[in-house]
Amino acid sequence: MEAKAVLEKIKSKRQPVILDVRTGFEFKSGHIPGAVHAPSWKLLVKMVNLPNDKNSEIVVTCEHGPRAAMASSILGLHGYRNVSLLSGHMAEWRRSRFPIEK
């Protein structure tokens, strides 16, 4: 999903579940407002509070893509079907000067 589309959904109060799979240090240094910190290993062992509805819209992000792709696969294994990756990832979000929460 394009970063601009995510931002528009946040502004219109239709925010999808945003899972940030970066490290704790990366997450604390700045993340998308309302994002849930969900490192991939925690997704793998089901230590992240995920929506009960397997059709919930979920957007996954990391810094450059590989961790988000892996997390998306894990979510698929857990039965989630409406999962997308943040296009351009956090690097693009920051370049676009979109809001960051610390």
Image (spheres, grey):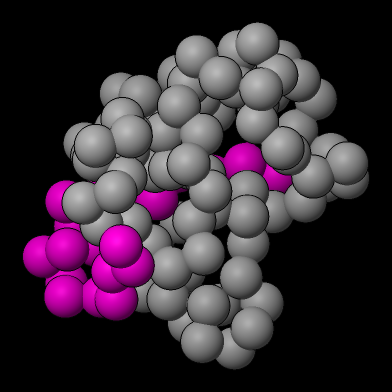
At 33% from the left and 57% from the top, the residue drawn is 31
Quarter that holds the C terminus = bottom left
Tell me if residue 94 comes above or below residue 46 in the rendering: below
Q: Residue furthest left?
A: 95
19 left or right of 87 in image = right
Q: Residue furthest bottom?
A: 12
89 left or right of 85 in image = left
| Foreground pick, 14 / 44 | 44
Q: How many marks?
A: 0
User: Which region shows up in magenta?
Assistant: 82-102
At 29% from the left and 76% from the top, the residue drawn is 99
Residue 91 located within the stretch drawn in magenta: yes
At 29% from the left and 48% from the top, the residue drawn is 28
How far across and down, in percent of the image, does residue 65 sit?
A: 29, 33
Res 96 → quadrant? bottom left
At 70% from the left and 44% from the top, the residue drawn is 82
How far across and down, in percent of the image, does residue 35 sit?
A: 49, 56
Tell me if residue 56 comes above or below residue 102 in the rendering: above
Residue 45 located within the stretch drawn in magenta: no
Can residue 22 be seen? yes
How far across and down, in percent of the image, does residue 36 sit?
A: 53, 48
How far across and down, in percent of the image, does residue 97 sit?
A: 16, 75
Can residue 3 be seen? no
Tell me if residue 102 comes above or below residue 82 in the rendering: below
Q: Residue furthest right?
A: 53
